[in-house]
């Protein structure tokens, strides 16, 4: 190896420039002075001079063929010149849109998490925890402007479900000024609402009368065999599988009494409908209203366009 | 035809003018690529890529030395090729005998021809120089090849690497020193006086 004692980077740079006759007059003076001081620098100069000549003497390779372009090659090059930026921009725009959609989803998610949850209108007995029930009750108390009178059917209200065969399981009974709205939504879920229209609706209603009127009403309103066969399977299952329908939120000790409740279970959607909406919402759209498959489609497009752009950029 | 006129026509879409420019500089471009890549086929590919790329980018040519612009595109094509080779290293096919024994030095067999035998030392020296060039970083290699092998001036090289002339000088100085050090591994190929000096240094 070469020893580089007493040779600085500046010396080497001057030496290199002197080989190419690229020293300024001042640099020439400086370099000559350094050469006089260092014999090693003289040796390096001689060796590098030889190296330069050896490099310059390397044989030039003959080109294997002319590199000029034919008309077809030129046209192809021009086409790719157009396509490549198109794919590049398409990829960038797709990726940007996907990012915007994901970002807005995150924002909407945060906003909806911070707002009170009042959207769940119905609960099943198995699923509804007590705190949720309490929250719902508290919410109803706050929200109801006018309390409505509800009939407490208790646990003895056999066979109320099914009504008269509406697909959603809604039955409406009219009995002596008492409107009874019954929502039967699934196998183990029932809500019962009875609204009295009389002014003295706060009186105790005789349980027998109520049961009797219900039996009469049921008998009157039971569907014809043909109609029953057309009813959805859920209705039949409800009436057959649950001998003792449990009524959500009813105090068994006060069965048969009219109680004051606020609100408004009548607004509750049938559970099937709620579930269907929730399911379809999860599957097809996000909170921004943009279907999920659109977002994934944009991501896929960004990847495909990006791959095409990269291919056109790097291929021969 | 004057170069500026050819450039002007080429920019306007005249393929013949463009091809004339290519023919003018293809030799220096190919040799630059060959010395950077140390592979003739790869150099041909890189040069062809550079020509196509240059044709696409003609509208972005903003004056200055056309040769420097062309060489810059060739250098970049070589760097791309080197990156590809790094990602996908190729294994050369070793020739074998009829008995499936590996021929260790096919180059040595090729050197048996009388013409090459006469130039054996020069060939070996060229191989040694190419070996040392291959060991250089790309930024040093491009500069020393352009200045010492292709004979370009500092300004052109500065334009090619898009750096100041001072950077060219500095890189060239370091590249030459590294080459010098590397070639000490091939003392038998060096002139006698350098061999003696090297041995003295070691002592």
Image (cartoon, coloured by chain):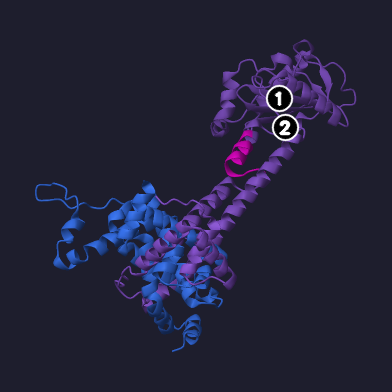
Q: Which mark is residue B16?
A: none
Q: Are marks 2 and 1 in contact (CB under 8 Å)?
A: yes
Does residue A86 show up? Answer: no
- In this view, the residue farthest toward the left is B98
Locate residue A269: give its quadrant. top right
Apparent side of residue A170 relative to residue A294 in the rendered image (left or right): right
- Residue identified by numbered label 2: A268
Apparent side of residue A94 relative to residue A316 in the rendered image (left or right): right
Lower sequence index among marks 2 and 1? 1
Residue A48: image x %, image y %? 41, 62
Does residue A257 show up? Answer: yes
Q: Indicate the chain coloured purple by its letter.
A: A
Parent chain of label 2: A
Q: Nearer the viewer, residue A179 or B48?
A: B48
Chain B's shade in the image?
Answer: blue
- In this view, the residue farthest toward the right is A199
Parent chain of label 1: A
Q: Residue at x 47, y 55 (%)?
A: A307
Q: Main secondary structure of the magenta part?
A: helix
Q: Residue at x 87, y 23 (%)?
A: A201
Q: Nearer the viewer, residue A190 or B16?
A: B16
Residues rendered magenta in the picture:
A275-288
Tell me the crowding category of disc 2: few under 14, some 14 to 19, or many 20 or more residues within 10 angstroms, Cα based. some
Badge 2 marks a residue whose secondary structure is loop
Residue B154 part of the magenta segment: no
Residue A131: image x %, image y %? 74, 20
- Residue identified by numbered label 1: A191
Residue B7: image x %, image y %? 49, 82
């Amino acid at each position: 190896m070469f020893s580089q004692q007493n040779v600085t980077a500046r010396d080497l740079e001057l030496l290199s420039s002197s080989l190419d006759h690229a020293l300024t007059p001042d640099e020439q003076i400086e370099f000559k002075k350094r050469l006089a001081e260092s014999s090693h620098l003289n040796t390096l100069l001689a060796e590098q001079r030889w190296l330069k000549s050896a490099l310059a003497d390397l044989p030039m390779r003959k080109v294997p063929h002319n590199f000029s372009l034919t008309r077809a090659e030129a046209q192809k090059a021009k086409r790719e010149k157009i396509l490549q930026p198109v794919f590049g921009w398409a990829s960038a725009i797709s990726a940007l849109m996907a990012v915007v959609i994901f970002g807005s989803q995150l924002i909407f998610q945060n906003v909806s998490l911070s707002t009170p949850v009042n959207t769940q209108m119905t609960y099943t007995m198995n699923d509804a925890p007590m705190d949720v029930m309490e929250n719902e009750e508290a919410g109803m108390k706050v929200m109801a402007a006018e309390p409505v009178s509800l009939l407490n059917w208790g646990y003895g209200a056999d066979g109320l479900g099914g009504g008269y065969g509406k697909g959603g399981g809604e039955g409406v009974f009219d009995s002596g000024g008492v409107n009874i709205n019954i929502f039967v939504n699934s196998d183990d879920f029932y809500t019962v609402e009875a609204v009295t229209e009389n002014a003295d609706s706060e009186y105790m209603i005789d349980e027998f009368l109520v049961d009797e009127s219900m039996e009469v009403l049921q008998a009157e309103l039971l569907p014809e065999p043909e109609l029953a066969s057309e009813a959805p399977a859920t209705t039949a299952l409800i009436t057959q599988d649950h001998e003792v329908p449990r009524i959500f939120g009813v105090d068994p000790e006060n069965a048969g009494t009219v109680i004051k409740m606020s609100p408004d279970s009548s607004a509750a959607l049938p559970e099937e409908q709620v579930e269907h909406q929730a399911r379809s919402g999860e599957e097809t759209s996000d909170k921004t209203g943009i279907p999920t498959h659109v977002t994934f489609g944009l991501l896929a497009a960004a990847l495909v366009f990006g791959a095409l752009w990269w291919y056109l950029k790097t291929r021969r | 035809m004057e170069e500026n006129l050819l450039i002007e026509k080429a920019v306007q879409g005249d393929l013949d003018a463009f091809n004339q420019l290519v023919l003018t500089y293809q030799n220096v471009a190919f040799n630059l690529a060959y010395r950077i890549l140390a592979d003739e086929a790869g150099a041909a590919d890189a040069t062809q890529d550079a020509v196509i790329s240059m044709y696409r980018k003609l509208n972005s040519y903003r004056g200055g030395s056309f040769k420097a612009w062309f060489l810059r595109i060739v250098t970049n094509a070589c760097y791309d090729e080197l990156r590809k080779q790094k990602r996908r290293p190729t294994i050369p096919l070793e020739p074998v005998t009829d008995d499936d024994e590996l021929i260790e030095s096919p180059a040595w067999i090729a050197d048996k021809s009388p013409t090459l035998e006469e130039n054996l030392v020069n060939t070996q020296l060229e191989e040694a120089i190419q070996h040392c060039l291959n060991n250089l970083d790309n930024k040093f290699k491009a500069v020393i090849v352009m200045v010492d092998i292709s004979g370009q001036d500092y300004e052109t090289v500065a334009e090619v690497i898009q750096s100041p002339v001072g950077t060219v000088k500095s890189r060239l100085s370091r590249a030459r020193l590294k080459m010098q050090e590397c070639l000490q591994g091939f003392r038998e190929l060096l002139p006698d006086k350098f061999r003696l000096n090297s041995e003295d240094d070691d002592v």
